[in-house]
Image: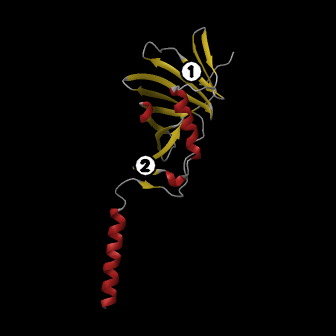
Amino acid sequence: MKFLKTAGTAAVLCAAALLCGCEGAISIGSAKLPDFSSSFSSDAEITFGNEKAQAEISRIEPGCWEFSFSEPKELSGVVMTLENGEITASLGELTVTAGEGGYTMLPVVIAEGLDELPNVKAESFTEENGVLTAKLDSCGSKCTITADKQSGEILSFKSPSNKLAVYFSNVSPYTEEVGLIEE
């Protein structure tokens, strides 16, 4: 009888310890992750220091991105594309291309960080309230990416050393119909 009482007390204490350990973010271990390599298009609010911008960000495929700015008015209409390490900015008939180099361009930091997300191991993610969080490096800077666990939609990208934060909304699969129109 004494053994059963001791075993029962130990079981209750173990259960209490397990419940207390689940209060914060937990590692998802070997759980199946969403497909972070899929193409998508999303409205985004971008904060860089004290500056704010609005853009539609589209990942056509890993390594191929388009940033279409609508705000502030100084950037309205600017479209930046990133493909194979080359970035092109255009506004109407004016187009400027920059090859690979030692420059720091915020679209490159964002794109490289999000393109790295499928390579992050499941045990490196934490999960809290259905939101997955990954910490990784992008262009030599530490960044944090959050995503919806169920849908895999990217929610935010933050790079404190670049004073950069991106908040995504209205994420939808990328399709050619809403994507680039080639002439």
Across and down, in percent, residue 77 comes to 51, 14
For disc 2, the marked residue is 130
Q: Secondary structure at mark 2?
A: loop
- Is residue 8 visible in the rendered structure shown here? yes
**Callout 2 amino acid:** Gly
* Apparent side of residue 155 relative to residue 94 in the rendered image (left or right): left
Residue placed furthest toward the front = 102
* Apparent side of residue 178 relative to residue 15 in the rendered image (left or right): right
Q: Is residue 107 above or below residue 95?
A: below
- Is residue 166 visible in the rendered structure shown here? no
Separation (CA) of disc 1 from disc 2: 32 Å
User: Foreground residue, 155 or 161?
Assistant: 161
Residue placed furthest toward the right = 183
- Count all numbered tags in the image, as a single digit: 2
Q: Which of the 4 image quarters holds residue 94?
A: top right
Disc with the residue nearer the chain's start (1 vs 2): 1
Q: Is residue 143 above or below residue 82?
A: below
**Mark drawn on residue 17:** none
Q: Which of the 4 image quarters holds residue 161?
A: top left
Across and down, in percent, residue 111 comes to 55, 32
Mark 2, other Cα within 10 Å: few <14 / some 14–19 / many ≥20: few
Q: Secondary structure at mark 1?
A: strand
**Callout 1 amino acid:** Met
Q: Is residue 6 above or below residue 109?
A: below
Across and down, in percent, residue 52 comes to 40, 23
For disc 1, the marked residue is 80
* Apparent side of residue 5 relative to residue 129 in the rendered image (left or right): left
User: Foreground residue, 60 or 174?
Assistant: 60
- Residue at image position (62%, 22%) is 180
- Residue at image position (35%, 70%) is 15
